[in-house]
Amino acid sequence: YTPLQNQLGPQLSQEHPSQQSAAYKERVIHLNRADAEGRVQFRSNSISTTKYTVVTFWPKFLFEQFRKAPNAFFFLIALLQQIPGISPTGRFTTAVPLSIIMLLTAIKEVVEDWNRMRTDRRVNNSRTRLLRHGTWQAAKWKQVQVGDLLMVENNCLLPADILLLSSSEPKGICYIETANLDGETNLKVRQSLPATSEHKQPSQLHSLQGQLVCEPPDDDTTKFKGSLYLDQVRYPVSLNQLLMRGTCLRKTSYVIGLVVYTGADTKVMKNSKPVPLKRSRVERESNRYFLLLLLILAFFTLFTTVANMIWTSRVGPFAWYITNNEISVGHFGAVLITCFIMFHTIVPISLQVTLEFMRIFQAYFIQCDLDMYDPIADIAAEARTSSLNEELGQVNFIFSDKTGTLTQNSMVFQGATVAGRMYGDAVSNGAGAYEFVSGVNSMRSEAAQGQNKDLDDFLSILTVCHTVIPERDSHDNLLEYSASSPDESALVYAAKDMGYELFERSLDTFVIVKVNGEMRRFEVLATFEFTSDRKRMSMVVRCPNGAIRVFCKGADSVIFSRLQSPHLVSETTNHMSKFAMAGLRTLCIAVGDMPQSEWSRLHTEYENARNDIERREAKLALVAEKLEKNLRLLGATAIEDRLQVGVPATINDLLLAGIRIWVLTGDKLETAVNIGYSCRLLQPEMEVRTLTGSSLSQVRSAVAELSHWLCGIASVKGKEPALVIEGESLSWASHQSVRNEFIDVSSCCWVSVELFKLLRYTTTPFCHNLPD
């Protein structure tokens, strides 16, 4: 490895990671080379999600209990009752009930933490297969170490974050379900490097020699950067080769991978925070009322003590039968403590017992509630933290994502606009919106004739510019498509219906498209995948005629700004508005031509960016900016995402309960409003206003106008306000000078999770976030 070490320099230093400088924190993993000298210490793959340990239970438990004001108060009373001659009650009048409360609470905490420990033990003792001494051997998850080669079989969970080396499928493809990570149930595609995709036998894997240099562990599940060195050749690796712990392998017999992160270093565990010492709102409210009772207690104690001092000063000298009837500081203190103990029952100790029993029985009833049982998944409700049961009834705001939460996440292609012509009829339904009637027969017939060049480019982009993988069914040999995004799958199936069939592909090499019986081969030169920041996806391809072209699809806001001329923008925008009013999702399609000389120059920059571990995303974004310019607009697509069953009724019930719902979506404004009416978040009798603005002054004026408008409709019976705000306006509305005014007027809003943070940390209402 001498040449490789010279190339990487200090990155391959054998020093302990803590002794390396901040500039060299990359993780270096050797293939098939045990760390015999123990120079590198990685985390164990054993995990623990428990709240306590045997050593920390009593200190942590007592701290949690005595930070509750009533418990601390009664503990003080129990101590004062032990002073002879001062307490008017028995020594154990308070100590015994308090001890019972503590014991019951401790038992509850032990039971809940024991259940967590049982879950941890079951997970840590799950079985997997490791390559040891040239053969596959059964092992427990907790025995997995960084650098191991392991095999995971179909329908099994990944025990660690691994780098995909090969799979049972051709070209190293596999399918994973990430529901445990992000709640999404649609399958995602991962593919190994071509250099390792054929290494499936133990002898082949055992002969692999090289190193993986990757970024240190972090909690970002949307990125992974690294380089795999095999035989002195450097191969960039990315998220497309990473299989994370907790994901489930689907539709793939097995995968083989190199363990990169284990245990607490895995991305899912990095996102799993330690179990906090939580306090419910009821508990915080009871603490506030407790302080009020303390003030009353202090008043009665002080009043009685002063009255006793006055009585003693007047009557004491004549009451020879009463001892200690002289006025002194000690006498005053003794009487004060006696009165304090005597009146302490103003604060009911039974309240704590009642609350604890209530929570225990509530948790039991929740878990036994048949109305909260899912017979399809065979899963019942589980109350993991009984101390937060009452929070469910105090939610004021619900934040919900649209796609996959309110909708089925099952996309259906409904139409398109190409070269200024709309394929499909948008018919007004008389309520200000449009119903889109599918009418793509003419589009299909024109594609079959092959005379429309713009339509040919449009359908070619739909067939090529994506990450969909075609595969043959083993039983009937039919071609099926597997996609990580249902939008991409819908577009590829739509293109197939038009005669443009995705026949074969290698993600980073080529795409073969069957067009009305003719095979066309597109060579993939570069791929820039879709991200929420970019809002677009681009591919540089060499077409069958040898021309180099840029295929691009994305949101209109980013595509229109990269066009060479505004040709077709007006017509396309008009058609997209009609699609949006019908509740359809729209996506712009554009193409660009690139000379060979320009690509030769940019290709070098592209490869350098791919090989830069530390600044890969930033450099690739710069290259993409140079490529994605002077584009020619071809048109746009329209896709429908149907609502899930029961969504309108559920939202209506929540609104009737006084809960305000904010739906977050990245669709166009018209689409969002139409979906709002479809799911009954927006209703005909509501007054709907839109907040838009591209600067702080504009948003401030708009918020002031909305505030005035709300004051005007407050006196109108039956009028409910609703607000729709665009993403750019939201960023200005969260500015410190406008934030409070915006929170006062906002009722319904959408676009990003920034909104949840804005409301959560600037107001007191309870917020509940609904992910996918």
Image: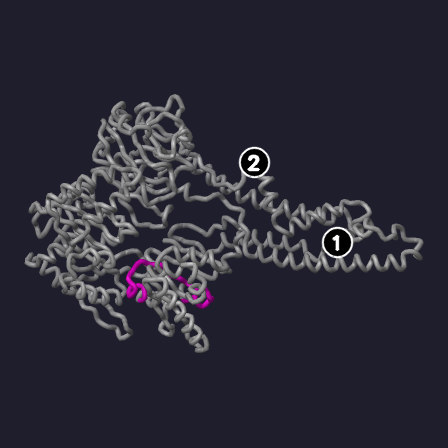
SS at mark 2 in the image: loop
Residue 765 tag number: none
Q: Look at mark 1 in the image and give the residue it sits on.
A: 340
Using the image, determine if residue 483 lies above or below residue 5.
below
Q: How many marks?
A: 2
Q: Quadrant of residue 372?
A: bottom left
Image disc number at residue 54: 2
Q: Position of residue 294 (x, y in %)?
A: 68, 57
- The answer to whether 278 is drawn above or below residue 149 in the figure is below
Whether residue 440 is visible here, answered yes or no, is no
Residue at image point 35% right, 28% down: 137
Residue 728 appears left or right of 327: left
Mark 1 or 2 closer to N-term? 2
The residue carrying pointer 1 sits among few (fewer than 14), some (14 to 19) or many (20 or more) residues within 10 Å by Cα, namely: many
Establish if 683 lies above or below 601: below
In 3D space, how far apart are the residues under numbered discs 1 and 2 (Cα atoms)? 38 Å
**Does the stretch in magenta take in 23?**
no
The answer to whether residue 625 is left or right of residue 262 is left
Foreground: 320 or 637? 320
The span shown in magenta is 652-673
